[in-house]
Image (cartoon, coloured by chain):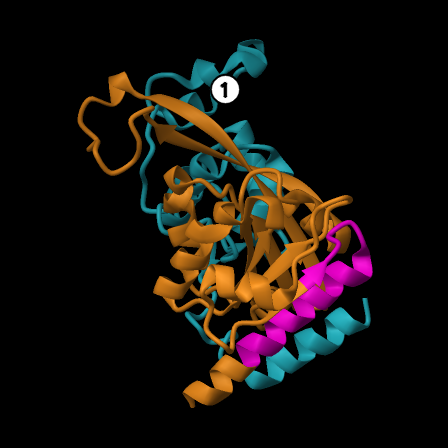
Chain colours: A orange, B cyan
Amino acid sequence: MDSVLSEDPVALKILVAGGFGVGKTTLVGSISEIKPLRTEEVLSDRGIGVDDLDGVETKSTTTVAMDFGRITIRDGLVVYLFGTPGQERFWFMWDELSHGALGAVVIADTRRLTDCFPSVDYFEQRGTPFVVAVNCFDGAAQHSVDDVRIALDLEDDVPVMLCDVRRRNSAKEVMITLVEHSLRTLASAN
Amino acid sequence: MSDSPQWFDEEAGPIVRPYALIRGRTHSSGDTFDLVATVRVIGEPTDEPGPEQQLILRAARNPISVADLAVEIDLPVGVVRVMLGDLRDNGLISVTSPSAGGARSNERILKEVINGLRAL
């Protein structure tokens, strides 16, 4: 049984966030083998936070599917990607996911830039390193990276980049940029 | 598994709602298991475990993450956590949390990840 007691695998979490339909699933699928992870949660229509656990009978369970991908770097070193629903009512999932996360990718669509405000706010407040990846949809009005930075009121050190989440190389670049950013954040903290 | 083992019989079929598998509970000692915590089997069951528990024990023969396990046995994470809590309380599995911030704050590992991503 000695082999069972071998060193624990290292597991790193990266979150992929952004508004509805912005390309989270596509990004995770471009770079990893994607699987739907079911998280059946007790929800009420009136939202989380106003209910306590009494009166559970008034609630229903909702199955929330999360995009879940894994990238095996080597035996014993795995990066897990979690694409999370962007709406605020799913923040209970984010709290768990961002605990110990390496960082986050916030996907932005310049046609609906406000959709990613909650994600940006969230990671800023949590101190989670993040990058903003502007997904260039066909026919989407192109805005410069600087415009997006200003519109989102981002700190200078937060990387903003254009990407096409359908392309594996582009998705790769986004992930590499994030991990490099996490590394810099780490170095400056030490 | 006190008074309703019949729920686990085959004739119950797929109509069993996931939370029925854990007798309606939504909480157990497994609540806080991280999605990327490592599950591994450490003991042999003395009683016959339920089919889902057997699936977990089979899937975790090699170390596996909580999230991978949930995908593997196709049950919601909340249900899997409750089952894992029970199995751990019975000494059948161990669940190791990723060291908080440990790997994240390890420069060598992050550089390895960057190089690994480049090589994809």
Q: Can the viewer see residue A12? A: no
Q: Which residue: 48% across, 60% down?
A: A152
Quadrant position of residue A122 = bottom left
Q: Nearer the viewer, residue A1 or A188?
A: A188
Q: Position of residue A75 (x, y in %)?
A: 72, 68
Please identify the quadrant where the N terminus of chain B is shown. top left
Q: Position of residue B88 (x, y in %)?
A: 40, 49
Q: Nearer the viewer, residue A86 or A58?
A: A86
Q: Which residue: 50% across, 65% down?
A: A150
Q: Amino acid at mark 1?
A: Phe
Q: Position of residue B20 (x, y in %)?
A: 41, 21
Q: Which chain letter matches label 1?
A: B
Q: Is residue A181 magenta?
A: yes
Residue interval drawn in magenta? A162-183
Q: Which residue: 78% across, 49% down?
A: A166
The residue carrying pointer 1 sits among few (fewer than 14), some (14 to 19) or many (20 or more) residues within 10 Å by Cα, namely some
Residue A13 to residue B3: above or below: below
Residue receiving disc 1: B8
Q: Is residue A139 left or right of residue B39?
A: right
Q: Position of residue A131 (x, y in %)?
A: 56, 66
Dominant secondary structure, magenta: helix
Q: Determine the secondary structure under disc 1.
A: helix
Residue B51 to residue A7: above or below: above
Q: Can the viewer see residue A47? A: yes
